[in-house]
Image (cartoon, rainbow, N blue to C red):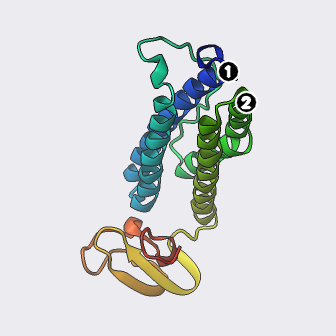
Amino acid sequence: MTEFSTSQTKANLMKAFAGESMARNRYEFAASQAKKQNLYVIEAVFKFTADQEKEHGEIFYNHLKDLAGEKLMVKGDYPVAPSDTVVQLLRAAQQAEREEYEDIYQQFGDKASQEGFMVVAESFYKIADIEKTHGERFGRFADLMEQGKLFVSDVECKWMCLNCGHVHESSTAPVACPVCHHNQGYFVRLELAPWTGRN
């Protein structure tokens, strides 16, 4: 087994911590952009994901606890994708998540396993699976926006207001919620709403 202090895994954990920290900030910035455009549902998706990225960063950071007090250099490539266009922000996030789950965290997990750090390897593999879910979620909302179907369905369906919980049945989300009067940007298809037991 490789000594942790001289391992590639140590460097990979710091890269992953930096990457998750930056992803969290990128998603917070993207959420702010969505909010400016009255797209509360997209803002909520970015914030929900940002909170999970914070947790991933903490998991990677805690694996470094034996090196407390040391300074580690981070070398890596990280995406830069600011945009005023919410769809572009969603697509950039989808791509960044895809790179993490298809490539980066698989390699980091393999290296940790090779060096004998099985608990760390499991963290990389399991978080890679979560990043796949993140990427698919961003892609789904980008698809809906590009198709002009974020608030319109080909068939009648149920829409939930994420502010008050009102459920509306129609092929189109209401322009404003009839209960709390928040705008259409708060509506999401019920099947995509969190904690409904339908997704």
Query: Above or below — where is 153 with respect to 105?
Result: below
Image position, residue 127 (x, y; %): 59, 46
Residue indicated by mark 1: 8
Q: Nearer the viewer, residue 115 or 44?
A: 115
Callout 2–callout 1 Cβ contact below 8 Å: yes
Query: Above or below — where is 47 with respect to 25?
Result: below
> Is the residue marked by circle 2 packed among few (<14), some (14-19), or many (20+) residues within 10 Å?
some
Describe residue 187's horizontal placement relative to residue 6 as left or right.
left
Sequence-wise first label, 2 or 1: 1
Describe residue 90's horizontal placement relative to residue 29 as left or right.
right
Disc 2 is placed on an element classified as helix
* Number of the label disc, if any, that sits on residue 86: none
Image position, residue 134 (x, y; %): 58, 53
Disc 1 is placed on an element classified as helix
Query: Above or below — where is 173 with respect to 49?
Result: below
Question: Residue at left 59%, top 26%?
Answer: 15
> Is the residue marked by circle 1 packed among few (<14), some (14-19), or many (20+) residues within 10 Å?
some
Image position, residue 64 (x, y; %): 50, 25
Image position, residue 124 (x, y; %): 62, 40
Question: Residue at left 64%, top 25%?
Answer: 9
Quarter of the N terminus within the rendering: top right
Residue indicated by mark 2: 111
Q: Nearer the viewer, residue 92 or 23?
A: 23
Question: Residue at left 48%, top 50%?
Answer: 49
Question: Residue at left 63%, top 26%?
Answer: 12
Figure quadrant of residue 10: top right
Task: Name which residue type carries label 1.
Answer: Gln
